[in-house]
Image: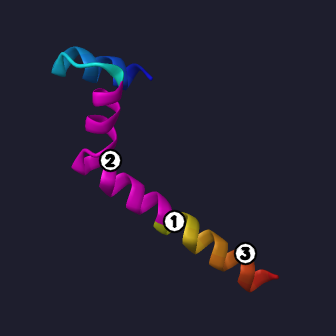
């Protein structure tokens, strides 16, 4: 939440605009893809163990 408030201050925008800017940032995209890949691997490993 703090990051959104910082984004709002830096961009001088409202919460909705800050959310769009924060969550669509390229670094967030890379983080999201890494997270999704890691969860996919964990799910595959769990299915293999079952």
44 lies left or right of 3? right
Q: Name the image quarter holding the N terminus.
A: top left
Magenta region, residue range: 16-36
Alpha carbon separation for disc pair 1 and 3 = 12 Å
Sequence-wise first label, 3 or 2: 2
47 lies left or right of 13? right
Residue 32 rendering spot, x and y as whole percentages: 41, 55
Residue drawn at the location 41% of the way across and 61% of the way down? 34
Alpha carbon separation for disc pair 3 and 2 = 27 Å
Q: Nearer the viewer, residue 16 or 8?
A: 16
Near mark 3 (Cα within 10 A), the count class, few <14, some 14-19 or many ≥20, is few
Residue 48 rendering spot, x and y as whole percentages: 72, 85
Residue ID for mark 2: 28
Numbered marks: total: 3
Residue drawn at the location 23% of the way across and 19% of the way down? 13
Secondary structure beneath dot 2 equals: helix
The image quarter in which residue 11 lies = top left
Look at discs 2 and 1 and give the one toward the viewer.
2
Is residue 12 positioned above or below 39 on the image? Answer: above
Residue ID for mark 3: 46
Specify whether residue 23 is painted magenta.
yes
Sequence-wise first label, 2 or 1: 2
Sequence-wise first label, 1 or 3: 1
Residue 33 rendering spot, x and y as whole percentages: 39, 62
């Amino acid at each position: 939440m703090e990051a959104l408030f910082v984004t709002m201050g830096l961009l001088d925008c409202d919460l909705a605009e800050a959310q769009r800017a924060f969550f669509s940032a390229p670094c967030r995209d890379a983080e999201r893809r890494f997270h999704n890949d890691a969860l996919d691997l964990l799910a595959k490993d769990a299915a293999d163990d079952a």
